[in-house]
Each structure stands twice: as structure tokens, then as C-alpha cells.
């Protein structure tokens, strides 16, 4: 209960800060939750059944009996670093920024993510643990650009 209240207080504080000087207050500078435990993050990921809808590139996760296969892959090769803040935001505000190419079945008619919002059920520790678990699965690669050659 204490952890839930702490997460609620953190989220309320973030929303309260947006009311004044929106652009300066929305900076990522100065915001950092404590490091989590990757093994505990894997356990929380499975406990909250995140693997019902997500796979992780390079990670074997147990199936959920009676569930369709997952359809949103996390991790893998990306062309820009997934920051700590981006992963936290993706978990606590899944509709903030949807990646291009999401399948229609994972996006609602109004363009919002259909991902369940766990904010009332997840502790701050579980959040930081899941972020610590996911972060190493992102492999940053240089994009393969083909520059046009002009005569």
C-alpha cells in the first residue's frame, strides 16, 4: 500500500509540474528513479503477465495457457538508444508515443494504446525492476542509409 501511495505521489507530482511553464518543466533533466534489479524485473514482468502481449528479442518467456501469441516485441535492434525515461514512460503512459507500424489490433479507434495501464497496481520498485530487466535487450545499431548519388 505504501509503495502504491508513493507511485501515486510521484505521478501526481509529475502532472502538477506540467501546469507551469510546460516546456521547461517537461525536461528529462533532473528526473531519475533508483536502479532496479533485473532478475526481480523479469519476475515482475511475468507476474503481471506482460508476456501475454509482449515478446522480448532474445529472451525465452513461458507461454500463457489459452492466450494468443504475443504481438508487440520489446528489445532487439533499434537505431537510437532507448533511455531509462523512455522505458519508464512507455510503461506508465503507454499511449504517450506509439511506434510507427503498430498492428491495428493493438491500437484503439481513437489512436490510443490498448495496453493495460498498471499505475494503480504496480509499485515503484516493480517499475524500476522491469525497466532494469528490459534495458539490456535493446541493441543500438547504425541505420543502413543509401545516399543518392547525383551526377
Image (cartoon, helix red, strand yellow):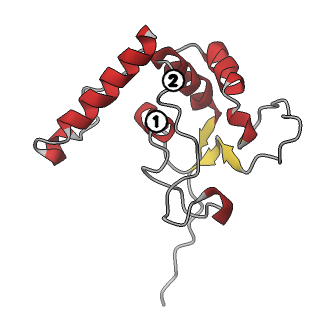
**Disc 2 packing (10 Å; few <14; some 14–19; many ≥20):** many
Q: Residue furthest bottom?
A: 151
Q: Which residue is mark 2?
A: 127
- Residue at disc 1, secondary structure: helix
Q: Quadrant of residue 83?
A: top left
Residue at x 58% of width, y 45% of height: 115
Q: Residue furthest left?
A: 21
Q: How many discs mark residues in the rendered view?
A: 2
Q: Are marks 2 and 1 in contact (CB under 8 Å)?
A: yes
Q: Nearer the viewer, residue 90 or 121?
A: 121
The numbered mark at residue 149 is: none
Report, in whole angstroms, how far the alpha carbon at label 2 lies from the one at label 1: 8 Å
Residue at x 52% of width, y 82% of height: 149
| Residue 132 makes an appearance in the image | yes
Residue at x 82% of width, y 31% of height: 60
Q: 24 left or right of 91?
A: left
Q: 134 left or right of 8?
A: right
The numbered mark at residue 92 is: 1
Residue at x 44% of width, y 17% of height: 4
Q: Nearer the viewer, residue 125 or 82?
A: 125
Q: Position of residue 94 (x, y in %)?
A: 49, 45
**Up-down: is 145 above or below 143?**
below
Q: Residue furthest top?
A: 2
Q: Quadrant of residue 135?
A: top right
- Residue at disc 2, secondary structure: helix
Amino acid at each position: 500500500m505504501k509503495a502504491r501511495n508513493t507511485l501515486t505521489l510521484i505521478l501526481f507530482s509529475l502532472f502538477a509540474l506540467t501546469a507551469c511553464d510546460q516546456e521547461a518543466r517537461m525536461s528529462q533533466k533532473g528526473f531519475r528513479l533508483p536502479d532496479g534489479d533485473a532478475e526481480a524485473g523479469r519476475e515482475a514482468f511475468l507476474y503481471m503477465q506482460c508476456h501475454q502481449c509482449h515478446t522480448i528479442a532474445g529472451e525465452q518467456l513461458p507461454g500463457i495457457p489459452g492466450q494468443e501469441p504475443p504481438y508487440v516485441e520489446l528489445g532487439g535492434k533499434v537505431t537510437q538508444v532507448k533511455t531509462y525515461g523512455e522505458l519508464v514512460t512507455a510503461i506508465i503512459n503507454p499511449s504517450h508515443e506509439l511506434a510507427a507500424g503498430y498492428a491495428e489490433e493493438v491500437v484503439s479507434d481513437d489512436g490510443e494504446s490498448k495496453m493495460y495501464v498498471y499505475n494503480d497496481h504496480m509499485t515503484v520498485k516493480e517499475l524500476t525492476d522491469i525497466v532494469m530487466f528490459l534495458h539490456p535487450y535493446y541493441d543500438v545499431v547504425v541505420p543502413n542509409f543509401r545516399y543518392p548519388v547525383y551526377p
